[in-house]
Amino acid sequence: MKKFLLFVIAGATAFTIGYNANLIYFSEDDRYPEQPINFSHKIHAGDNSIPCQYCHIYADKSSVSGVPSVQRCMGCHKLIKTDAPEIQKLKGYWDRQEPIPWVKVHRLADFVYFSHKRHLKANVPCQRCHGDVASMDRITRQAVFAGIPYLRVSNFKMGWCLDCHTNGAREFIGAPVKNGQDCWTCHK
Amino acid sequence: MLNRRDFLKLAGVGATGAAAGFALAEYSKNPAAKLIPYLVPPEDIIPGVANWYASACMQCGAGCGILVRVMEGRAKKIEGNPIHPVNKGGLCARGQAGLQALYNPDRIKTPLSRTGERGKGEFKEITWEEGISILSKNLLDLRGKGESDKLCLLTSPIRGHLDSMLEVFMKAYGSPNYLHYELFQYENLRFANKVVLGQYTLPHYDIANTNYLLSFGADFLTSWISPVNHSYGYGHMRQGRDGIRGKLVQIEPRLSLAGANADEWVPVRPGSEGLLALSIAYEIVAGGYYKGGDAQRWKDVLNRYSAKTTAPLTEVPEQKIHSLAREFAAAKPGLAIGGENVASYENGSANLVAINLLNYLTGNIEKTGGVILNPDWVKKSFNPISTLAQDAANGKIKTLILYNTNPVFTTPAAMKIEQSLNKVPFIVSLSSFNDETTILADLILPTHTYLEDWGDVFAEPAAGFQATAIIQPAVNPVFNTRGVGDIFLAAAKGIGGNMQKELPWDNFGVFLQDSWKKIYERYKGAGITEANFKDFWNNLLAKGGWWGKEARRSKSVQNLSPAEVSANLPSEPARFDGDDKEYPFYLTLYPHSVFKDGTGANLPWLQELPDQMTSVVWGTWVEMNPITAQGIGIKDGDMLKVESPYGRIHAPVYLYPGQRPDTISIPIGQGHRSYGRYADGRGANPIELIPYKTDAKTGAIPLNSTRVKVAKSDMSGRLVKLEGVTRELGRNIVQTISLEEFKNMKS
C-alpha cells in the first residue's frame, strides 16, 4: 500500500516536472515566437511613444484591433532609417507586394466572442491584457520571474476574464460589468 | 528499502509521468497561426465588421430582396431585405442556401472546351480569350453562311434588363429564336390569365386581405410563384386582422403543406379540378350570386357543369359543392387560385381558366383581397420547349446557346431531347454548374452566381405594384468566371459590325446603369424624388431596388363573353395514359419543397433539410395511402418499383394518409446524373415516368398524365426520415374520450 502511494506521488511529481519543463524551456516558439521581421514594440511604443492605435487602427471600431498593413509601415519607413537591415527586409516585402507573415502570439479560444471595441470604450488600457508592450523588444506572453521565464502576462482563460468582469472593472467603469457574468456576453 | 525491482518500477513511473506531462503541455499549446496583414487596406473594409449589401435573390423567379453579409470580402450570410415589398424581410431555405451555390466545389471554375465524345464529360481548360473567340468565330461563320436564323438562345426566364440586352443581341444578329424555358414557368396560368384577365403577366394574388381562399392544388406556401410573399400574406389573412380569420379550403388529391394548413381539405379526383371549379361557378350563377346582366348567358354556358353532373366525376359530394359555392360567393372578398398541380394536367390551361372564372363571377378582380393586376409587360406567350426539340432534330438549329437552363433533366424521356440536341453542331453553355444539359456542350463558359454579378429583377408578380430589385456584386468572383451579360457584350465585340454598334457597352454594369437612367427619366417627379441620377442610383444600391405604388398602372377589368370563354373550358376530366386495370394508380408529381425543379439538389443544406410533410431527407420517396399499401402488402419504407407505360423508377415508399387511395405522388428534384457530388446518384427522377404530351392550347408538358403500377423492388435502398412512428402505440399522447363518457362527465 505504502509502495503504491510512493508510486503515485512519484508519478504525479514527474508529471508536474515534465509539464513545466516544457512550458519553461521548450515553449519559446509558442509564447515568444520569432517574427519574420525583428520588429520592436519597445522602439515604437516605448522610446518614440507612438500610440497603439496609430498602427492598430481598427481597435476602437471592431472586434479585432487589426495588424498594420504593409502600406502603413512604409508610410514612415520610406524616409525613416531606410538603411537598417530590418527596414530593408520590410522594403523587400513591399517591393515584392507580399504581406508580412507575422506569427500570432495572443490567442483567444474561437468560442469566445471578444471585442476590442467594447473594451476600449470602457477605457481598459491595452497593457492590461497584452502586458507592458512598450518595454518588449519582441512580443511575448511570458514574463521573467527570478530569472526564470514563467509567469504569463495573462492566460486568457475564463476565470481571468471573469475576475476582471466582476472586480477589476471597478477600476475602469466604477462598477462590475453589466451582464458581465452572463454566458451570452462572451459565448454567442 | 527499495530493491532493484521497485527502483526500476519507480524509474519507469517517473519517466512515464514526466513524458505524459510534457506531452500534455505540448498538446495544449496554440496551433501555430499567422497574422497576414493587408498590403494596402481597402477603404470600405474594417476587419471584424460586416458590410451588408442589398441585392436580389435569384434562387427562384420570385425576385425577393436580400441583404448579403460580407466580412472581408467573403459572403457569410444572406437575409431577407426588410424593406422589400415582395418578401418583407423573409427568406426561404433556398434563398439561405444561395451561399452554397457561390462556394460550391462543383462549380465550373474556368472556360472549358470539349475534347472527348459529346456527353462523356471530357473537357480541356481554355482561357477566356480563347473561349470568347471560339464563340464569336462560330457566330461569324454562321452569319457568313446566311444562316443567322439558325442560332438559338435558350435561357431560364429572365425578369430584368439582361432580357432586353439579349433581345437586342439576337435581333442584331438576325435570329428570332430567343426562348425561355423552365419546368415551372406558368405558361398555362399565363394563358388562363390572358383569357380571363386580359394579360399574360402574372397578377398579384392578395392572399393577405382575402376572407376566403379557395386553393385548387396551389401549394402557395412552399413552391408556387412567390412562396415567401404568400407565406407573409397567409399569416396576415389568418391572424393579422382584428376579428377576421380568413378561411382556407384546399382542393387537391395529395395533401400539400398548404393543404395541411387548410380548414378543409377536399381530396378531389385527379384531373377533375377544373370541372369542380366550373360546378362551383354554375352554382354561384344559379344561386343568383352573380350580379351581371348576362347571368342567363353564363348559366347556359355552365349548364352542363351542375353539381349533380360533376359530383360523380370529381368524387366530391353534391352537398359539398353547394356549400363551397355558397361560402365562396358570400365571402367578400374571396380569392380562387389554381396551382401547379392543376396546371400540370393535359387540360391544365382549361382548368385554370375555370378557376379564374370564379374570381370573375364573384367580382374579385382588381379588388383588395382578390386578384390585383400588374403592369402588363410580358409581351408574348412562351414558345414551348417542344418546338425547340423539333427544330433541333430537324437541323433547323446550327448553334445553340444555353444559359442557366436544364431541359434534359426536366423533360420526359419520351421527348428524346438529348438525341435532338445531339444533332445541333455547336452547343455553348453559359452555366455555373455542369448539369445534364451543359455536359452536352462543345464550349462551356462559366458564369458568375448572382452574388458576384450585376443585374436586376422586375419581380413578377411583385406585390400589387411594381417592385424591382438590383443585383450588385457582393463579393469578388470566387472562380475564373464572368457575368453572362459581359460574355454577350464580349461576343458582340468579337463579331463586330452592327453587333458592336448595337451593344457598345464595355461591361454589363454600365449597360445596367444606362438602362436605369431611362427609368429615372421616365418616372422622375412621378415616384422618383431624387434630384439627379447619381443620387437615385446610389439610393437604388443602398435600398436594394425601387418600388412604390406610383409604379402601378391602373387596369380595368375586362368584360368576358361567355361564349368565347366557353371554348377554353375543360369538358371532361384530364386523361391519364395506361389501362386502369394494369396500372391502378394515378400518378401526380409535385416540385420538392426546396429542390423545386431539381436546381436546388446540389446544395447540401437543402439535401439535409427534412421535407415539411414527410421529414424525408436525401432521397426520393413515393407517397402512398396506408390503407392501399396494406391491401397490397406494402410496409412503410419498402423499396418500390413504380412503373408507367413509359418508364420505371425505384424509390422507397412513404405511407401518407394525406393521399387519395387511388393516387400516388412523387416529388421532383432528385435523380441527377450530372449535377455535382451532392446531387448525383441520389433518389430517382420521376419525370422519366411521364409520357410526352402537350397542352393543346399552350404546348406545356403535363406532369400528371399517366397511371402507374407498383411492386416491391429487389433493389436496395432506404427511406431516411427524421420522424419516428406516426401512430400512438399506446403511448397515450393524444388523450381521447368517447361521446358517451363526455356526456356523463361532471364539470
Image (cartoon, rainbow, N blue to C red):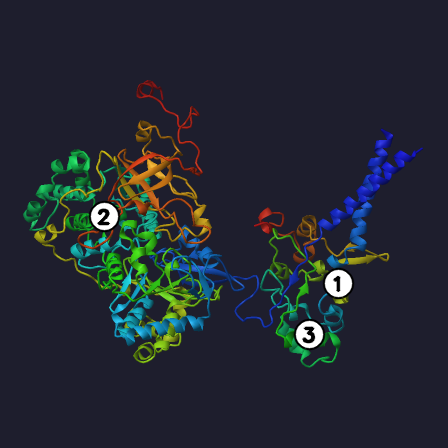
Q: Is residue A159 left or right of residue B348?
A: right
Q: Residues within 10 Å of mark 1 (few under 14, many from 20)?
A: some
Q: Residue at x 43, y 38 (%)?
A: B717
Q: Which residue is mark 2?
A: B335
Q: Residue at x 25, y 47 (%)?
A: B691
Chain under callout 3: A
Q: Which residue is mark 3?
A: A90
Q: Which residue is mark 1?
A: A132
CA–CA distance between discs 2 and 1?
Answer: 73 Å
Q: Give the quarter of the image for residue A173.
A: bottom right
| In the image, residue B176 above or below residue B646 | below
Residue B184: x and y, percent?
30, 53
Q: What's the amino acid at mark 1? A: Asp
User: Looking at the figure, which quarter contains the C terminus of chain B?
Assistant: top left
Disc 1 versus disc 3: nearer the observer: 3
Residue B199: x and y, percent?
20, 59
Q: Give the quarter of the image for residue B376.
A: bottom left
Q: Are marks 1 and 3 in contact (CB under 8 Å)?
A: no
B485 or B714: nearer the viewer:
B714
Q: Residue at x 84, y 41 (%)?
A: B14
Regarding mark 1 in the picture, which secondary structure is present there?
loop
Q: What's the amino acid at mark 2? A: Leu
Q: Note whether residue B474 is visible.
A: no
Q: Residue furthest front?
A: B117
Q: Earlier in the sequence, mark 1 or mark 3?
A: 3
Regarding mark 3 in the picture, which secondary structure is present there?
helix
Q: What's the amino acid at mark 3? A: Leu
